[in-house]
Amino acid sequence: MESVAAVFAGTAFALFGAALLIWTGARAVHRAPVLHGVSPVASTALTTLFGVVFLALGVWCFTLV
């Protein structure tokens, strides 16, 4: 039963991380602000970092299955 939870959590983390990376990349390509009121470099770097972390967390969850 724990494998079902690991698959669900892994899917949720991986989808969120991938979507965050795609969204950040699209905003960066169009030179649009990732977060209003914050330095463009800092916001792009921070969202990229969190996207990679969530994607890695999803992959880690899949290794528990």
Image (cartoon, grey):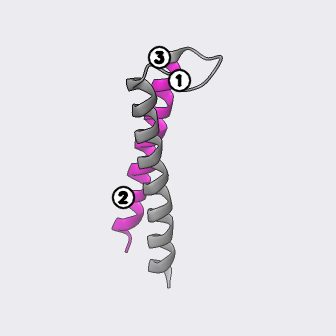
Task: Residue lying at the far top in this picture: please name it.
Answer: 39
Instruction: Name the spot of residue 50 as percent of width and height, x first.
Output: 48, 39
Disc 3 designates what residue? 41
- Residue 16 is situated, as x and y percent measured from the top left of the image, at 49, 51
Give the secondary structure at mark 1: helix
Mark 3 is surrounded, within 10 Å at the Cα level, by few (under 14), some (14 to 19) or many (20 or more) other residues, namely: few
Task: Estimate the x, y position of residue 9 in percent, counting from the top left.
Answer: 50, 65
Which residue in the rendered view is the most extreme toward the bottom? 1
Q: Can you say which quadrant of the picture contains the C terminus?
A: bottom left
Q: Residue at x 48, y 79 (%)?
A: 4
The quadrant where residue 45 appears: top left
Q: Is residue 61 magenta?
A: yes
In the rendered structure, the answer to whether residue 40 lies left or right of residue 28 reads right
Residue 8 has which mark? none
Q: Say which label, 3 or 2, has the lower sequence index.
A: 3
Question: Cα distance, mark 1 to mark 3?
Answer: 6 Å
Residue annotated with mark 2: 59
Spatial CA distance of label 3 from label 2 is 27 Å
Which marked residue is nearer to the observer: mark 3 or mark 2?
Answer: 3
Identify the magenta region: 42-65
Image coordinates of residue 32 in percent, x first then y, are 50, 21
Q: Residue at x 38, y 25 (%)?
A: 29
Disc 3 residue type (three-letter): Val
Task: Classify mark 3: helix, strand or loop.
Answer: helix
Q: Are marks 1 and 3 in contact (CB under 8 Å)?
A: yes
Instruction: Please name the amino acid that badge 2 sits on.
Output: Val
Quick check: 14 above or below 36? below
Which residue is found at the position 43% from the left and 53% from the top?
Answer: 57
Asked if residue 60 lies in the magenta stretch, the reply is: yes
* Residue holding disc 1: 43
Nearer the N terminus, badge 1 or badge 2? 1
